Amino acid sequence: METVALNENELPSAARRRLSVVLAADGEESAAALALRRSTVSFAGVAHGHLEKILQEEEGDDQEGPTSTSQQPQQQQQQQLPSRRDNRASVVGRRASAFSRVFALSSTSESFMEGNIRPTLINAMIFLSDPKPDVNKIRQVLADRLLCIPRFRSVVKMDDKSRVHFDPLPRDAVDFRQHIKLVDGRGKYDAEDIEELVTDSFLTDWPSDRPLWRGTLVTNLADGRSLLFIVIDHAIGDGVGLLAVLLSLFDDPADTDGGAAADKSETKTEKLQQKRKTTPSLRWSHRIVAFLGGMYDGIINTLVPPPCDNPSSITIPKEQLEYPCPGKTLAQTRGFPIDEVKSIKNKLAGATVNDIILALIAVAVRKSFEKTGDEALDVILKGKGKVRADFPVNMRTGTAKGGAELGNDSVLGTFRFPIKHSDPIDAVWQCKSRVDEIKVSPAFHLKKVLSDAIFGNAPDTVLSAEILHAMNQSTCMVSNVIGPSQEAALGGYDISDLNFTTAYVGGLYFGVLTFKGNLRISAILDKRCSGDVEVIRDSLEEAYDDLRDALKDVDEDCPLRQPDMTPLAARILEGVVYIAAVALPVLVAMQFQK
């Protein structure tokens, strides 16, 4: 499985009347009213943005609530904002692709919003070493590097045919004092507060007159750092494109060789957007069976989705899918040294880091079922159930120009976890075999063609009736992001840690991120699930320790070999071919004797 393939919502409040931090505080706005304001592609939002900006400049408002600090002089604040010289007003909005359309409908379609189908959000958590960075410096960096990308200054609109357009605003209409809020953590802001921040962003409506992203700079965390929390709607782009944008925000620390580091970062981005061409280690019969299975999956399972995974403690109960979400819980594992992870995979011949990651999740899911006494485990071990993960597959054919090709040029793949394994090593081998099958499968290309046709043309009322159940067919979502391997900075402030996660309408999300030599796995669990995200986190760490300990006596120069995992269908095919090869000469000879 390609590294880029595992790459990479808001839900309403109880009464769907919760005021957004970005909406006017003097009135409530229903889903119908919000959809109506997004129903016309126009420049109405531009004038609104200018007026709002003038009012804010008169008020001098900068930071939320009682945490407000001393204000910067008005002239300095104006200097920190984008210059009017950089205005680039677009005459015609760009029409969204099929997948971008589906993501954008969550904030533009009345039927989506009334159906509690909320936007899929990508959360970037950038931890800065400095406890109190200058918010204006951060705003300036983001303004300089994001406003040159049209989608980061575009308002999303839906026309009367339920087609979605990105309508660009002039650069000075994007008010960064509204897009980047400032909050003082007062030395008490900890992991629970960050989890609350994830939930708040998940439950907060997008405004109809601003681009679909926002951020919060939290200073004075309990651990002595600060946090820049950026939320981006998936309609703007997929994981590959947004990761390139994220990396473009970073600088190299002053004491490093900026040129050399930049070259490495660019190389890393290029590798993310190129497909790996590793050769799967399958027998010819196994390849044929996998290819045919991929055709069935790509066509039949796309048009007629298979049954959902078994209900469990980590899935949302079907009867609660259409209910408002009470929030999300978040937990992150300790950092696993990437060199140690690579050493583990080197001890298993032909294995990849992705094989290791998937095996860890498979072992962790089983462990969490065992700890919580989940009845789903008995069903799965009897061969009557399954636990699957959806993962976005990058379908780009080449490297993006400028490293920031946005949009959603991807398709969802599905991976079935080997919950029924004998030990962690067996879990790795099973994952490797299934990933190798995926590598020869044509399913992604077939799904891409069919999905684009369906999602690009189906009315929003039809999609809204099916999308919640479709996004909960599998147990979870998995994505894998490769961050900078070297030290990095933002606006002159050193970055101490990084997290890149997704919040969506499903029950469980696993986000894998490597940064500065460490690999971490984050889990985000919907509060409607009965499971415990901390149990999942602990199970992931235990799974890693178990696999590492099981291989401690294995030499990397003499790695373990994968056992033969050829499926029965492939063996039958081999038998048929062998019999035909032996019988054919006999039949020919008998024919000549006649």
Image (spheres, grey):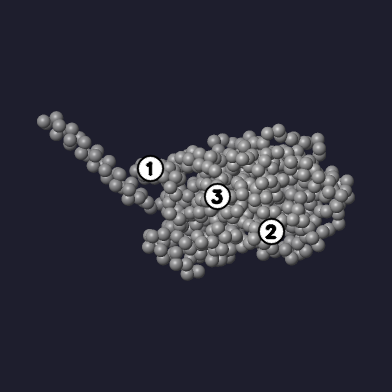
Quadrant that contains the C terminus? top left
Query: Horizontal placement of 269 versus 177: left or right?
Result: left
Name the residue beneath numbered marker 3. Answer: 464
- Disc 2 on helix, strand or loop? loop
Could you say which is closer to the camera, residue 486 or residue 2? Answer: 2
Which corner quadrant of the image does residue 324 belong to?
Answer: bottom right
Name the residue beneath numbered marker 2. Answer: 18
List x then y, in percent, for residue 223.
72, 63
The residue at the point 47 percent across, 62 percent down is: 311
The amino acid at mark 1 is: Leu
Q: Which sits earlier in the primary sequence, circle 1 or circle 2?
A: 2
Residue 292 - label? 1
- Cα distance in 3D space between marks 1 and 2: 50 Å
Residue 373 in view in this figure: yes
What is the number of callouts on the image? 3
Q: Nearer the viewer, mark 1 or mark 3?
A: 3
List x then y, in percent, for residue 177.
78, 50
Q: Which sits earlier in the primary sequence, circle 2 or circle 3?
A: 2
- Disc 3 on helix, strand or loop? helix
The residue at the point 17 percent across, 36 percent down is: 586
- Local packing at callout 2 (Cα closer than 10 Å; few below 14, some 14-19, many 20+) is some
In the figure, 274 relative to 375: above or below?
above
